[in-house]
Image (cartoon, helix red, strand yellow):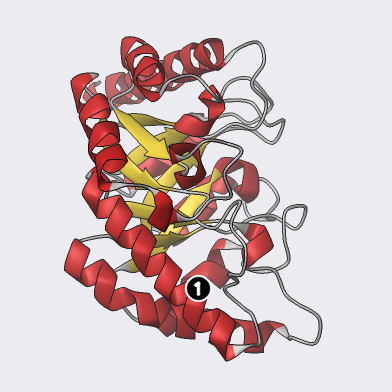
């Protein structure tokens, strides 16, 4: 397995220092929330991220021995964009903005863009679910040429009902990807979100094997794997069974006792399980 971390958990810490910390803990990838690339007091727009800033971030990650996996929180802290908006002009602007994010992702060396951003995709008043699906598919299809040109895949992220009202299950995300009908639109799975579904997590993984390209590790308690009730043995076994070769990317929502401690405990827990699976396979 390849282990990555999501950079926003380090807050205002300089990016190069955060990269050095995670590499020292055994991580080899970093997943970037675009809004972290500008000062927090600046309204975020990807077009404000200069070419020099993009180059510096890529070089800092490489210098620390990290690969930039890609982007997540794609539309967080932006305004005027929405995946399922009934206004065609808003949808077109959203597609154009996502294409700009695709170019950012490629410049950083990334290959995956995780589409979570629930506030920018939730159902709006007067829009039914089926209509929202068609709106979302329209936006995503418009972004696919940029994805193909840059070698980037948009990975749709199901989120539980506590977080949103659109794309709440792996099946719903797969259905939307089928509507987009592009090899550059696939599925991302998140353990915290899957814990809200009725099938067991390992069953969801098995059923999603043909679509899965990225994976977030965490726990419904908002901390890291092994720090809550979710047992990762069946999860890691299922990922091994479906020959998943992507990243296990740590995304948490509580940062105590500290990002470094959460990172350490998470990777140690997962590596212990991975070693146990390898021993069992060899016996």
Q: Residue at x 44, y 68 (%)?
A: 97
From the viewer's side, name the closer residue of 132 and 120. 120
Residue displayed at 57% across by 71% down = 172
**Residue 223 place in picture, x, y as percent:** 64, 26
Q: Nearer the viewer, residue 21 or 45?
A: 45
Decide if residue 185 is in sight here.
Answer: yes
Q: Where is the C terminus found, in terms of image quarters? A: top left
What is the count of numbered marks? 1
Image quadrant in which you'd find residue 187: bottom left
In the orientation shown, which residue stands out farthest toward the right?
125
Note whether 177 is above or below 24 in the view shown.
Answer: below
Residue that mark 1 sits on: 94
Number of other residues with Cα within 10 Å of mark 1, as a class: few under 14, some 14 to 19, many 20 or more: many
Let me know if residue 183 appears in the view: no
- As rendered, which of 167 and 79 lies closer to the eye? 79
Percent position of residue 247, x then y = 34, 39
Q: Taking 254 as reference, is 207 above or below it?
A: below
Residue 23's quadrant in the figure? top left
Q: Is residue 124 left or right of residue 31?
A: right
Q: x, y (%) of residue 215?
A: 43, 44
Residue 109 placement (x, y as % from top left): 22, 45
Q: Is residue 203 left or right of residue 129?
A: left
Q: Quadrant of the N terminus?
A: top left
The kind of secondary structure element at disc 1 is: helix
Q: Nearer the viewer, residue 125 or 194?
A: 125
Q: Residue at x 50, y 73 (%)?
A: 94
The answer to which image quadrant residue 258 occupies is top right
């Amino acid at each position: 397995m390849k282990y990555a971390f999501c950079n926003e958990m380090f807050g205002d810490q300089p990016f190069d220092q955060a990269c050095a910390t995670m590499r020292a803990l055994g991580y080899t990838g970093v997943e970037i929330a675009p809004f972290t690339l500008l000062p927090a007091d600046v309204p975020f727009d990807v077009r404000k991220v200069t070419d020099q800033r993009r180059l510096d971030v890529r070089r800092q990650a490489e210098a620390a021995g990290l690969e930039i996996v890609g982007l997540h929180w794609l539309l967080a802290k932006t305004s005027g964009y929405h995946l399922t908006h009934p206004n065609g002009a808003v949808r077109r602007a959203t597609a154009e903005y996502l294409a700009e994010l695709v170019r950012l992702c490629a410049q950083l060396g990334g290959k995956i863009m995780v589409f979570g951003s629930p506030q920018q995709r939730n159902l709006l008043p007067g829009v039914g679910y089926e209509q929202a699906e068609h709106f979302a598919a329209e936006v995503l299809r418009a972004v696919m040429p940029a994805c193909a040109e840059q070698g980037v895949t948009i990975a749709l992220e199901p989120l539980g009902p506590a977080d949103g009202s659109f794309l709440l299950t792996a099946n719903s995300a797969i259905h939307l990807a089928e509507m987009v009908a592009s090899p550059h639109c696939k599925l991302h799975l998140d353990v915290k979100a899957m814990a809200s579904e009725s099938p067991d997590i390992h069953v969801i993984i098995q059923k999603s094997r043909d679509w899965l390209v990225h994976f977030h590790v965490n726990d419904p308690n908002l901390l890291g794997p092994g720090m809550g009730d979710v047992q990762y043995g069946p999860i890691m076994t299922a990922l091994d069974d479906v020959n998943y070769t992507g990243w296990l990317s740590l995304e948490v929502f509580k940062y105590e006792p500290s990002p470094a401690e959460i990172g350490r405990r998470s990777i140690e827990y997962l590596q212990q399980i991975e070693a146990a699976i390898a021993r069992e396979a060899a016996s």
